[in-house]
Amino acid sequence: MQLGLITFGSLLPDPLTGKTLTQRQRLRDVVRAAAEAEDAGFAWYTVGEHHFGERDVISSPAPVLAAIAEHTSTIRLATGTTLVANRDPVLVAEDYALVDLLSDGRLELIAGASFFPEPYAVFGQSPESKAARKRENTELLIRLWTEERVTWQGEFRPPLTEVTVQPRPSQSAPPLWISGGVGSESVHLAVEHGLPLVVGTTAREPRTFVPVFDAYRTLWQESGHTDPPGRLGAASHVFVAESSQRARSVWASYMNNYLTVKKPGSTHFTTPPDFGTYIGDNGPAICGSPAEVVDKLGRLHELWGHDLHLLAIDVGGIPYAEVQAATELTAAEVLPQVAVLGSRAVTGA
């Protein structure tokens, strides 16, 4: 199983010191962390997209990934996710073809839709159209990247007549994944187009997602695909330290800080889940010593049979030095242990 890092550019005051970085400082940390992740041996560095909130500063992963491309050479550069349901797919095709070229073919685009109401309100889109927009825009994106001239008509944007997107991606096959949750629409979309799937597993009990992973493999077999099922990915909030006691004592304040901030579309601050439950055996987050982190990643792999896991470490205003130390420890003592875990090709195997 491969490990990658995922960041949304979370920018919050440090709950222990009250210090807040500038937006520029935070973005520079995101860029330098990517180069360090490559040196440490991580397979992916993933940049998320959020709009109109008080917590995250990256509204467009494309320019951030372009900057990262200039400081790296081998690590896969991913979006987590690109909100194709909320963006014009023609512009998505153009922007990320540029990223693929600048990175010499290292782009991985994860196609999704915002789960917050603000983008739909600000962009003048109906929240009820989310699934239909995601499907239509993803399918158009595939055509724009695989066909030289596209003539097309759909429901949500003006028609196209003999449109050729320039530049063209460096990779011959679209570097495209589908982002999914607990619903079935994204699973069907991924299987229909023979695409891999990343499931957003950060906020619910792990067993909640077992039917999603199993449905992907089952539908793949039933759909007539002759090749093996596509790759499957997951994500977790993660923190690792030399001992479980230190990991918990350091991370609790920052994770609670992250979970209590006012979300887009909300008028109030939420009450965080109990920290012990959140990082416990049945909780979505992972926190502890390297051995504990390896153990939980192994148990999640047994549940889901996935082969890519994205780790969100830099949340809640945690100082860069703590993120750096946790990342280095993960690379040294966790990554080699989980690398031997293989994917599960057959449902229930």
Image (cartoon, rainbow, N blue to C red):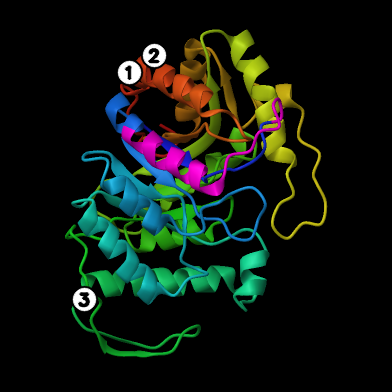
Q: Which residue is mark 1?
A: 336
Please, what secondary structure does the residue beneath circle 1 have? Answer: helix
State how far apart marks 1 and 2 are (Cα): 6 Å
Look at 81% across and 57% down and name the residue there.
267
N-terminal of the pair, mark 3 or mark 2, is: 3
- Disc 1 marks a residue whose amino acid type is Pro
Q: Is residue 2 visible?
A: no
Judge left or right: residue 13 versus residue 218. Answer: right
10 and 297: which one is in front?
10
What label does residue 6 carry, if any? Answer: none
Q: Main secondary structure of the magenta part?
A: helix
Residue 85 spot, x, y in % from top left? 50, 68
Q: Which residue is mark 3?
A: 147
What segment carries the magenta color?
A: 15-35
Q: Which quarter of the image is occupied by the N terminus?
A: top left
- Disc 3 marks a residue whose amino acid type is Glu
Look at 63% across and 40% down and name the residue there.
203
Q: Which quarter of the image is occupied by the C terminus?
A: top left
Q: Residues within 10 Å of mark 2 (few under 14, many from 20)?
A: some
